[in-house]
Image (cartoon, grey):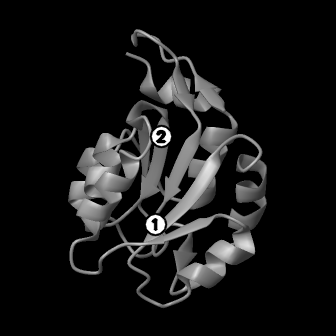
Amino acid sequence: MIVVNIPGRDKNLEINTLLLDLNGTISFDGHLIEGVAERIARLKEKVDIYLLTADTFGFGAQIAEELEIEFYKVDSEDGDKDKKAFVHRFDAQNVAAIGNGFNDRSMLSEAGISIVIIGPEGCSPKALAAADIAVTDINHAFDLLLNPMRIKATMRA
């Protein structure tokens, strides 16, 4: 579990589930971004991790298997709805979500804490508006979760 104490909130965030988008988030042009595997290995010690993707390049299941995380394929036409529903398989307040695309907007909005990636593939303005934090690199997002005091500094009231 990752515990984040954010001044101005009634209670601590207790994150035990991490939902990840694939393309433009942990991968670029179908290839895993350098540094991701190492950070996911560390995060798996604290939270359960799920990869949610429409799988544009067809490598989602393989990447999830390599990372030893759960894979969930969303509808390519209405993946936003699937991702939102997936958040609610858990207590949404205990979920962290990371994404960059239009089909991530509801997942980001519903999660207890959400991080949007503004990377080489860009970022949907709707996803940006739905997120709690924006970063320019997935490894920075993972480092926030691995060092929750950084989240506290960004999210304080």
Q: CA distance from mark 2 to mark 1?
A: 13 Å
Residue 91, picture quadrant: top left
| Residue 33 visible (yes or no) | no
Task: Return the x and y of residue 85 as percentages of the image width and height.
Answer: 31, 53
The residue under the point 60% across, 40% down is 144
User: x, y (%) of residue 75?
Assistant: 30, 76
Dot 2 amino acid type: Val
Q: Residue at x 34, y 59 (%)?
A: 83
Residue matched to label 1:
52
- N-terminal of the pair, mark 2 or mark 1, is 1
Residue for badge 2: 95
Label 1 neighbour load within 10 Å: few <14, some 14-19, many 20+: many
Can you say which quadrant of the picture contains the C terminus? top left
Task: Report the residue at 44% width, 41% height from top.
Answer: 90
> Judging from the image, what secondary structure is the residue with disc 2 in?
strand
- Residue in front for this viewpoint, 123 or 1: 1
At x 54% / y 31%, what residue is drawn? 151
Residue kind at label 1, given as amino acid type: Leu
Q: Quadrant of residue 92?
A: top left
In this view of the protein, which residue sits in the foreground, 43 or 132? 43
